Image (tube, rainbow, N blue to C red):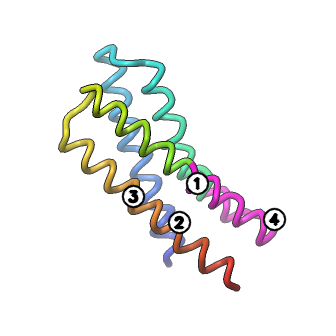
Amino acid sequence: MAESLLRDKSKQFAKDIVYLCRNMKANRKEAVLVNQLLRSATSIGANIHEAQYAQSKNDFISKLEIAQKECYETEYWLELLYETECFEEAEYTTLQNNCGSIRRMLISSLKTIKSK
């Protein structure tokens, strides 16, 4: 159940980021940084999704750890783009909160699986 919630949240987050990046690109804002955000944010869900097909416990842990690292990177790009006025505070707050929520779920999942 928790894994399904994590997959669903990360997929919705990726979609929200795609829409944000599409809008920023249409407004010709920081294309290189927008691409970095798009890559890291969509990688979170991709690695979570890929983890369900892991070949071993270690492979599963590795995929979730990569997703966690991508969360940290995504938070950085969101902060940088917000601080350089590429999008509004309300959108930044929502996206940063969602990313943080996914990161905390990953941390919890990793602690649980590593303790088994």
Q: Marks 1 and 4, Cα distance to the nearest angstrom? A: 17 Å
Residue ranking furthest to the right: 55
Q: Which mark is residue 100?
A: 3
Residue ranking furthest to the top: 28
Q: Within the magenta stretch, is there residue 87?
A: no
N-terminal label among 4 and 2: 4
Give coordinates of residue 114: x percent, y percent: 68, 77
Residue visible at 40% across and 44% down? 15
Report crowding for label 1: few under 14, some 14 to 19, many 20 or more residues within 10 A (C-alpha): many
Contact (CB < 8 A) between labels 1 and 2?
Answer: yes
N-terminal label among 1 and 3: 1
Of residues 43 and 73, the one nearer the viewer is 73
Residue under label 2, please give it: 106
N-terminal label among 4 and 3: 4
Viewer-nearest of discs 1 and 4: 1
The answer to whether 48 appears left or right of 104 in the picture is right
Residue under label 1, please give it: 67
Q: Quadrant of residue 101?
A: bottom left
Report crowding for label 4: few under 14, some 14 to 19, many 20 or more residues within 10 A (C-alpha): few
Question: Is disc 2 placed on a helix, strand or loop?
Answer: helix
Residue visible at 60% across and 80% down? 112
Q: Marks 1 and 3, Cα distance to the nearest angstrom? A: 12 Å
Q: Which mark is residue 55?
A: 4
Q: For the magenta stretch, what is the residue range?
A: 49-69
